[in-house]
Amino acid sequence: MSFAATLSAGETLTLAGGLADLEAGTGLSLSFRSDLLAPGTAPPVANGLRDIEITGLSGFLEGDLDKLVLRDMLIQTNAFEQSIREVGPISVGAVERTAKGQVRLRDIALQAGPRDHPVFRLKGTVDDVLELDGLVLSGAVDLPVADLLTAPGTGLGRIVGTLDVSDTDGTIGVDALDGRITDSNVMSGTLSLVRDDAAGPRAPHEIRLASTFAIPDFGAFAAQMGASSSSNARVTFSGMLSASAESLKAEGKASLGRTEITGVLSSTLGPGRTLFEGKLASPLVYVDELTALAEASRDAVEADRARRGSTATQAKTSAPIDPQTEPQIAPQVEPEIDLARLVDLDLDISANRLNSAGDTASGLKARLTLDKGMARLDPFSASYMGGRIKAAVQSDLTATPTLVRAKGTVEGWPLSTFLNASNVGFATQGRLKLAFDMSVDPTSDAALLRTLNGTLSVGLTGGRLATGKLDLAGLGIIAGLFNEAVRSDSTALRCVSAPLSFTAGVARTAPAVVIETDHVRVVGRGTIDLPRNTINIYAEPRPLDGKENDLGYPFAITGALSSPQVGTVARRPDARLYRLGAGCKRRG
């Protein structure tokens, strides 16, 4: 007996064999083969589990019609080009009908992947084939890590271990799994299935794995992934991995270079979007190392996208491939993934200290959210340069340009940190208090200066200048000779109010800067041009209780911000400046 058929789409089915006794139904010998792809057609690329398709079947049946044996069954798929391209051979010791009319398979043996090095070998039974009931399989797993990560490197090793599968709880699931990464000098790891519920209630069909993972040198690992990296940081993870139909979760401790992070991070698949949420904490964050690792990870993802795009281009055809006549198709890179449109975030972040290029911050607490492209840090607080920052930050990552808006306060910044950098020529004391509501394009230093817009209000507590020139300018030479501040060359600042309005990086007094000592009030107006690095402020000092015409020595601050020049100016009194000075609130 022989049979052959070709379907309209090019699929083929062939049968060959015979039945020794048709009436008794004994002596069956039948081989079968089905090719589900037209001849010469490349299989579709499988980038994930949902893309896996069966591309061919073959095998041999023998025995009697009431007791058949399946020999050397082979299932061809498009899964994992090098490892599970084939499932088989599959053999069944006996096909039986039970007293309840069920079809039972005994002594099943199957393997997947290359015959000389299969990915897994399993043995067991199925009590009811039609209902997939009473399934028990166990065996060994040996899977190349490069195939899981779709990486070109040959040094990533293999995941080797044991596996038990059954339908004990009513659905087919994994009962036991233990594995480790072997034959790799760039990574190591272990995983073991956790069956108890000590970690909390489970989601339906959730699998939990106790896992360890280590990459001694991220640069060497990146090279195996087809990317380059200047970072040689060590990366490790130790904790619990959980997976269900719609979510993944990692809980434990990770180290990224010298940065150690503890917490929990989960991802949940939703309609067209994936939500990542969790809580992360670290005693000390090395920002520069994390930035280098992030850039290296991005390069690895881009390299993987390029490989996938090239593979998809070569495989994308519905006609038979003829290398002599088929035109060459240039590899195409997959379109760039827009994470802002595909991913949502909700993370609580805390760190005792942060280190970046020698600068340090402490007491970081923040909630980071991303909702349909709108990113927010709200609330955000951290101690930096001796002061405490509290702010709400947001940015629409889908907009062009991508502007960042920040609104909040800063309390406690030392005045000396800023004025000493400008070479003012005398020591200063005091703590700044800032209130801000500003937006900026942070994509480059030049863009940052050109796009700075918003408002900034500056105040000062405990202020003191190691010079008496401010009092001298307001009192004049004669009165200044008898002034204690002038004689001691030290002036206490009782009130400082500096409201500024920024437009395209240029700050304007809004309406004026007011400084008061015990004896003098100084009122100034002007601009600070950040893109051009210049300042132009005109100020009028007067005795604290002086009238409009009781003008001291007006002065101007001009020149480069890094080294401003201060000089007297001969002008008539400005009545508006006099009136604007009345609003300063003294701070004792």
Image (spheres, helix red, strand yellow):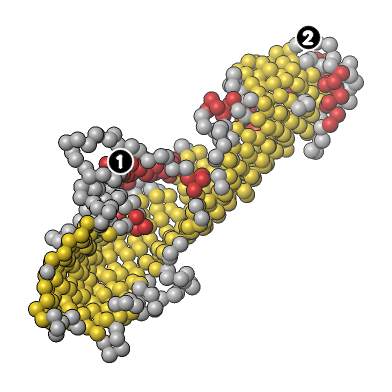
Q: Which mark is residue 379?
A: none
The residue mark sitting in front, 2 or 1, is 1
* 367 up-or-down from 302: above or below: below
Residue extending farthest top: 570
Separation (CA) of disc 2 from disc 1? 76 Å
Q: Residue at x 59, y 19 (%)?
A: 532
Q: Residue at x 56, y 29 (%)?
A: 448
Residue 522: x percent and y percent? 79, 24
- The amino acid at mark 1 is Thr
Q: Residues within 10 Å of mark 2 (few under 14, many from 20)?
A: few
Nearer the observer, 470 or 54: 54
Q: Residues within 10 Å of mark 1 (few under 14, many from 20)?
A: some
* 460 up-or-down from 169: above or below: above
Residue 16: x percent and y percent? 13, 67
Q: Which residue is mark 1?
A: 313
- The amino acid at mark 2 is Ala
Q: Which residue is mark 2?
A: 570
Q: Secondary structure at mark 1?
A: helix
Q: Residue at x 57, y 49 (%)?
A: 371
Instruction: Choose top left, top right, bottom left or bottom right for residue 556.
Output: top right
> Does residue 573 appear anywhere in the picture?
yes
